[in-house]
Image: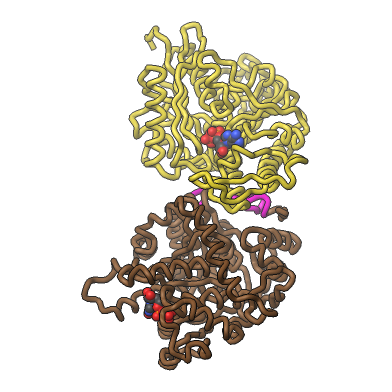
Chain colours: A brown, B yellow
Amino acid sequence: MTEAENIAVGLPPVHRVPVIRVVGLGGAGLQAVAHMVQSGLTGLTFAVAHTDARQLAQCAVEPKVLFGGGITRGLGAGGDPDVGRAAAEADVEALRELARDQDLVILVTGLGGGTGSGAAPVLARAARDCGALVVGVAALPFDFEGQRRIQQAQQSLRQLKCAADAVICLPNQKIAGLLDDTTTLLDTFRVANDHLAEGVRGLSRLVTQEGLINVNFADLCRVVRGRQAESSFASASAAGEHRSREVVQKLFSSPFLEGGNLLAEAEAVLASLVGGPDLTLREVKHVMEQINRACENSQVVMGAAIDPSCTGRLAMTLIVTRRSTSDAAAAGEGKEQAEAEAPLVSEFPIEGGRNGLTLKEGNEPARPASRFVPPPPKLSPEQAQQLLANQAGTGAARRRQKQAKLRQGMLPLEVVSKGRFARSEPTLYRGEDLDTPTYIRRGVPLN
Amino acid sequence: MFDKSNKIIVGLEIGTSKVCAVVGELGQEGNLRITGVGQAKSRGVRKGEIVDTGAAVEDIRAAIAEAEQMADVEIRSVYLGVTGGHIRGFNNRGRHAIPSADREITADDVQDVVKNARAINIPAENHVIHVIRHHFIVDGQEGVLQPVGMLGAQIEVDVHVVHGVTNRLQNPIRAVKSLQLDVEDIVFNGIASSLAVLTPEEKELGVLVIDLGAGVTNYVAYVNGIIKHTGVLAVGGDHVTNDLAYGLKTSMGRAEALKIEHGSAVVGPGDKGQTIAISNDVGLPERSINLEHLRRIMSLRIEETLQIVAEDLETVGLIDYLRAGVRLCGGGARVPNVSRLAEQVFGLPVSVGRTKSISGLVSTLDQPEFATGIGLVKFGSFQVEKRVARGGWRTRLKSTLSRMLQGA
Ligand SMILES: Nc1nc2c(ncn2[C@@H]2O[C@H](COP(=O)(O)OP(=O)(O)O)[C@@H](O)[C@H]2O)c(=O)[nH]1
Ligand SMILES: Nc1ncnc2c1ncn2[C@@H]1O[C@H](COP(=O)(O)OP(=O)(O)O)[C@@H](O)[C@H]1O
Ligand SMILES: [Mg+2]
Ligand SMILES: [Mg+2]
């Protein structure tokens, strides 16, 4: 790689990986997480939690938590989210244990039933109270499952969006196009779980793997956090001579991106590319260019990493956040969301932190110190501090301000998005990339 | 040319935000009138250079068609504006020993010394766009304006050369040619803009013109009536917008709208604590934007851009010669208080350049974005006048262009 190319790509910053746990919740969550374990997802730990003792016993994932036994007697939530929620509230301490010492909790669940729908928001809050960043990955019901489940799922999704830092949705219906009529229901869920696993793999890769171009925790937060809209994801991989073109074509034809249309309307896109040690800069550029072209109006954060198991192959994951303003319903949604959250709070009043719900800033437990080490100083430490300080001061992050402050200077912050300038050569001046916002390069705080 | 009717001259700027075609009519008395202008939103250009030929060609077509309709002419050829981060301007000195026994300097000697000057230090893959001749030096005697007929052993000349990477200059030429339009000549956008906004007095006094475009910032300095320095910085209004989108966590489209509606080049004392409510498509309030942040982000970017230009002028030692100050043009000149900010950066009087020195669609055209297009027409009118004076119409420049396109 030439000097110029190094500058263009950004040298890989040195940092230790964040601690990540994937928690499967409810029947669907169990299945999906078991699938992930089987498919050899590494670099993170797993756990499952359910109200149904029998299903839990059949699941090979450890550790397991049976919760709400006093309410359900281990027989499941019977499709009633209120039961699922009460069960989780009753054993919130056990659920909170699952999130202890984690930097990132990926909460995998199926919404529409009772356990996942009711317990997910409770678990998400508890995990956040432990100081973890919480990303929900939620499967939504097929159309054929009926209106009640779909509505239940929507209601729960709104609550989860309030409780978690971000929610990424995977509507099961979207895979319907990939199947034919003779596919069994089990196979159908297997395909859905494959997608969930790939999504989680991409997500964890984004924040753990040392990259040529590093996307990090801060980038992830920026794309997914505090947005009213939900995110979707899509993954694809390709091998062979034309892999850099094929992988993008596959992605664009993914039902989860609505044939690439979603990209054009996206607000923000997080793109993670993984190749083997044979990955060339040209391939990275080629893929990134295509993605950028499709996302011209959105903020694009891109990462690229090497994984020896990917030799000869390219794997790509996109996390896409929709523009929330484009649908007229969006305005009403905020209100609905507040309403959706209200009963949660009032029905289960806070008793001395027993259930972990904290409304007042001052009571928030301190976030444990992060295990991140700062990257080689591109910014001076003061600049980084200021930057992180103002990142913490906006949007939904405000609620977490106190916790975020503890992380100041610990998370690497790097701008890798070239957005509008992706297709032109970088404007370099005295060693600085002028395409990066001036206020960031100068470390000017915005508060 | 035997044509006795008025000559049509068209300037075409394939800008980053808009493609703009300006039609001028050169009367037989040498009076220039602007008779039409056509514009299209530019979709295929980034940082002043074409990145999507298909889109760019469509936009050029649309702009040309609109200009044709307004001016009621058929456009066959254009003076094409070029820019981009690869374009460089610098001064060269050429030398030539007088070979003749009597040591009398001939017109051929003058040609040779200029040829030497333009060739020095230019990479092989580059093309010379302009050579601006300063003065001659005969046997060490400076400031010679007309050396032909003088006696001497050596003649030297200082020139300002503007050059760029040939391949990259070919892209816009090719796009124009694909529409069956001829390119009369290519002109550096910064020079074109300066022709539109400057008076001869300002050039004589010393002046800097900065064209603040969407993709690039072009600048040209005149001292004693001659271009002494040119430059391009591939930073423009798009960077301002991108910074805002990033800092205010919003889309590019929304950031652009916020910039135009609420932007300022300086943060005012009253901006603190002010917020702007932004509404969604159905008009309901959605979130609020901190006005101080918006203006701080903008101010930092614009200040930096101007500082880089100022540093460059300091490096070449011209900053103290700009007695007429600085003129701004391009869409970026519309940013409120940008002149004030530039005055702080340069320590010189700054104003927005006006394009009033041409007749025709005066009020329509006296807008900073049109400086390049109008200047291209002016440049064209000079060429036509020169050509008429020389009596030939196939210029050397045109053949240079076809050379550039060979093998394309
Ligand atoms: N992707 C996926 N979705 C599932 C799977 N099993 C169930 N679902 C979906 O998840 C929803 C909730 O079901 P389930 O998790 O069994 O209910 P719970 O245990 O009460 O939360 C259902 O409506 C299905 O759409 C599975 O294995 N994979
Ligand atoms: N009122 C305004 N405030 C701030 N920026 C403006 C304003 N009007 C135009 N601009 C900016 O000027 C740029 C366009 O200028 P222009 O000279 O037409 O560019 P180009 O020649 O590169 O197409 C855009 O970046 C646009 O955002
Ligand atoms: Mg479930
Ligand atoms: Mg321009």
- Residue B390 visible in image: yes
The mark total stands at 0
Decide which of A55, B73 is in the foreground and name it.
A55
Q: Residue at x 67, y 26 (%)?
A: B222
Left or right of residue B37, residue A409 in this image:
right
A204 inside magenta stretch: no
Q: Is residue A433 magenta?
A: yes
Bounds of the magenta segment:
A422-440
Residue A90 position by quadrant: bottom right
Q: Nearer the viewer, residue B355 or A157?
A: A157
Percent position of residue A52, x then y: 44, 88
Residue A91 drawn above or below residue B77: below
Up-down relation of residue B232 to residue B374 (above or below): below
Q: Seen from this angle, which residue lies furthest front?
A: A347
Which percent across, then down, holds residue B327? 67, 27
Q: Quadrant of the C terminus of chain B?
A: top left
Q: Is residue B367 above or below residue A22?
A: above
Q: Which image quadrant is residue A242 in? A: bottom left
Residue at the image position 75 percent from the left and 39 percent from the top: B268
Q: Residue B378's x, y, as percent?
A: 53, 20
Residue A428 seen anywhere in this rendered image of the structure: no
> Residue at coordinates 39% horizontally, 73% vertically from top-left?
A195
Does residue B373 sit above or below A13 in this rendering?
above
Q: Main secondary structure of the magenta part?
A: loop
Q: Which quadrant: the N terminus of chain B? A: top left
Give the image location of residue A417, x and y in percent: 55, 57
